[in-house]
Image: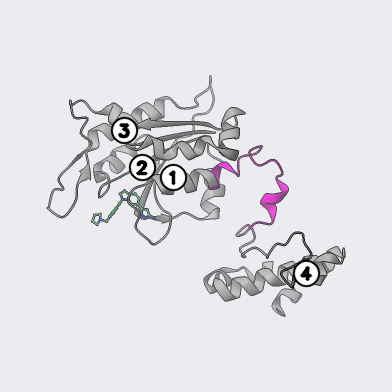
Amino acid sequence: MRIDVVSIFPEYLSALDLSLIGKAREQGLLQLTVTDLREFTADRHRTVDDTPYGGGAGMVMKPEPWALALDAARTRGPAGAGAPEQRPVLVVPSPAGEVFTQATARELALREHLVFACGRYEGIDERVVEWSREHFEVRPMSLGDYVLNGGEVAVLAMVEAIGRLVPGVIGNPESLVEESHSDGLLEYPVYTKPALWRDRPVPEVLLSGHHGRIARWRRDRQLQRTAARRPDLVAALDPAGLDRADRDV
Ligand SMILES: Nc1cc(-c2ccc3ccn(Cc4ccc(CN5CCCC5)cc4)c3c2)n[nH]1
């Protein structure tokens, strides 16, 4: 998978050089580039913003540098010789986007080429989104219902959530199976040594070695946690995915 990120703060994305994503890049599982939008300006001051038409506070990002930067990212794409060129996905972080979920991460982890446009100021001139539809599948994307100062933090989160689903990136794919949201529920609590810590024991069942009971206990904890913290997820559950014992929790 190829990932291209465009930002006026490329150093913000240096966290992607570290840990699992960094190793995946070294192993060639992910080709990730970060480009400074200012490389695509033509004036002496490398101007990327201007005042908003219609008035209002703040500044808006000019369209031309973005069009040049996105075209460069697109044509840098993974089109190998004769490879069927899927249209790249252009993810545009925005408070007004669809909400990014684990399902979105799973969907985007299957794509060949992702381009992320990190806006700043009050956002990017809307005509860039419209212009981009000719060559990209454009996806305005929100991390959640709160306002950040720009797209970089959202891109760090999305690249991590997507990257870890790319085969080979996570050493043990087993750990992807039972994690939160993989089955529509929150995850169960985890424990490790010591068995007694500051007068607090580990739940007895986890020391029993009885795998059936342990699985049941974990599933019960998932259902209780989800009901307590995320009633919205319970409402969205597919009843067919619940067994009789689930209904007794
Ligand atoms: N999930 C999530 C994503 C973001 C996010 C993503 C990209 C950018 C680029 C700039 N900003 C700051 C920012 C500040 C104020 C407004 C609201 N203004 C009101 C009138 C016009 C706009 C919008 C945008 C971002 C924020 N925030 N939260």
Q: CA distance from mark 4 to mark 2?
A: 44 Å
Q: x, y percentage for residue 130?
A: 29, 42
Q: Earlier in the sequence, mark 3 or mark 2?
A: 3
Q: x, y percentage for residue 212?
A: 84, 66
Q: Would residue 136 be visible to someone looking at this image?
A: no
Would you say 131 lies left or right of 91 here?
Answer: left
Q: Which residues are magenta?
A: 161-179
Would you say 233 lies left or right of 243 here?
Answer: left
Q: Earlier in the sequence, mark 3 or mark 4?
A: 3
Q: Amino acid at mark 3?
A: Leu
Q: Amino acid at mark 4?
A: Arg
Q: Residue furthest right?
A: 209
**With respect to residue 123, does 223 lie above or below?**
below
How dense is the environment of label 2, judged by Cα within 10 Å: few (below 14), some, or many (20 and up)? many
Which residue is located at x 70 percent, y 62 percent?
Answer: 190
Q: Residue 118 bears which disc, if any? A: 2
What element does badge 3 sit on?
A: helix
Which residue is located at x 55 percent, y 68 percent?
Answer: 233
Q: CA distance from mark 1 to mark 2?
A: 7 Å
- Residue placed under numbered mark 4 in the picture: 216
Does the CB distance between marks 1 and 2 fall below 8 Å?
Answer: yes
Q: Residue 37 bears which disc, if any? A: 3
Q: Residue furthest top?
A: 81
**Which residue is at the front of the view, 42 or 241?**
42
Q: Is mark 2 within 8 Å of ligand 1?
A: yes
Q: Quadrant of the N terminus?
A: top right
Q: Quadrant of residue 23?
A: top right
Magenta span dominant secondary structure:
loop
Would you say 57 lies left or right of 197 here?
Answer: left
On whether residue 155 falls in the magenta region, the answer is: no
Does the CB distance between marks 4 and 1 fall below 8 Å?
Answer: no
Q: Residue 155 bears which disc, if any? A: 1
